[in-house]
Image (cartoon, helix red, strand yellow):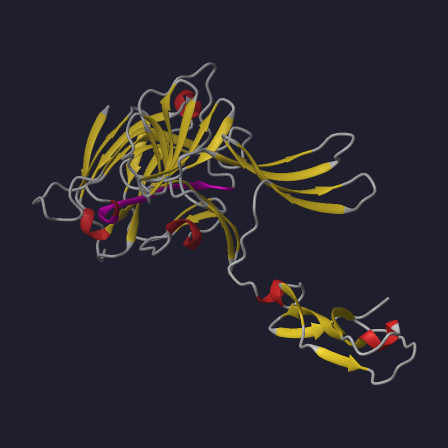
Amino acid sequence: MQQYAFNAPSNAVGGKWYPVIFRRSTGSTGELASRVIITTTSADGNYEMNNCEFNGMVMPGGWTDRGSYAAGYFSTYQTNERAIHSIVTSLKEDDVCSVFYVEGRAFPVRVSAEEGLTVIVPTQDYTVGQTTYKWGATNPATESTNAQAILDFNNGRGFYCSHSIFGINAIFSGNLGIGTANALGGNSIVLGDNDTGFKQNGDGVLDAYANGVHVFRFINGSARSLKGIQAGESKFFTLSSANTAARNASFNLWGNSSRPTVAELGDDSGWHFYSQRNTDNSVIFAVNGQIQPSNWDNIDSRYVKDVRLGSQQYYGVNNWQTWNFQCPSGHVLSGINVQDTGSNSADNIAGVYYRPVQKYINGTWYNVASV
């Protein structure tokens, strides 16, 4: 490989991106992907443009069926310290140029390129056919004409590939981080957040984590939520466990030919209650025990709490002939006044006592009615 070093182009400024062009020959080697290494300036450790590097393969394809592609390892100390922005290629007839965009402060750059490649650092916009590569760009791909970014190094250090990676029975060893480093360890995948993702924690055991908190577990036969399950958006319905109960509980929906739909709550010792829709479409609710309301007002206002006989009343007669008496509605006889005043039997009954039958509902006594 050929070694090169390039200073910054005239009038280059910090904060802008400038093209470093790897141009293939049009000879027999023109159809081969090219190995390239590009490294930015070496300086003090606190210099943010220090030692940013790409080491890999590039292939410009333009509008050919082959298309453009690139793959390789990109290194930078911090994600926000990248000194190489992206690799840009043509969408039109240019199938010879692979363009690396370097920050103005990152020069001089050192380059290793395969034989057959020419390295160009232009001092103005660079045009090949219908494609123009912008010089001094803020966003290289969008500010260039008929061009595309096949790799954008915006995710920090790591291996980059412009196309999907496939394999037959491929095995990935170690943990995987998508968009971030992996803090879960073991056989795990994190997505965007270093401690949010999935981890295999045993044979047939797959766990889900959010910010390092174990929230879900999938095992053979069940899916377990280790935190509350919520349904809704602004207001939530939550299903949760405080993990302090003496027994496991379940809420089960089942049915059969005689009991078509049953929603039942129970624990390890049996059922507590159920709501059931019957074959005639009626609904019943059953409780395996006593119902204990915290407020009895509704029951007190509807049901009889006590029964008594009311105040005594008297019906008397002062004659010596046959007589009769019927209690008023809702009353019963409670006594007879017998006296020895004559020989006739009617003369011996001076009167009768009677009382109302009363019921107690919601704090008030009411006289009962007669049929």
Work out whether residue 152 or residue 91 is closer to the camera in this orientation and state it: 152
Q: How many marks?
A: 0
| Image: 306 above or below 177 | below
Q: Position of residue 185 (x, y in %)?
A: 28, 29
Q: Residue furthest bottom?
A: 318
Using residue 122 as the reference point, say whether residue 341 is left or right of it: right
- List x then y, in percent, for residue 114: 29, 25
Q: Is residue 205 left or right of residue 286?
A: left
For the N terminus, give its image quadrant: top left
* Snapshot quadrant of residue 72: top left
- Is residue 317 located in the magenta-colored stretch of the structure? no
Horizontal and vertical percent position of residue 205: 41, 24
| The stretch drawn in magenta includes residue 88 | yes
Does residue 320 appear to the left or right of 335 in the view shown? right
Q: Can the viewer see residue 328 in this picture? A: no
Position of 197 relative to 221 (above/below): below
Residue drawn at the location 67% of the way across and 65% of the way down:
302
- x and y percentages locating residue 127 in the rendered image: 41, 47
Residue nearest the viewer, comparing 55 with 26: 55
* In the image, farthest residue toward the top: 169
Q: Which residues are magenta?
A: 80-91
Furthest toward the left, the residue is 44
Find residue 31 and report its image quarter.
Answer: top left
295 or 235, nearer to the observer: 295
Q: Residue furthest right?
A: 322
Image quadrant occupied by the C terminus: bottom right
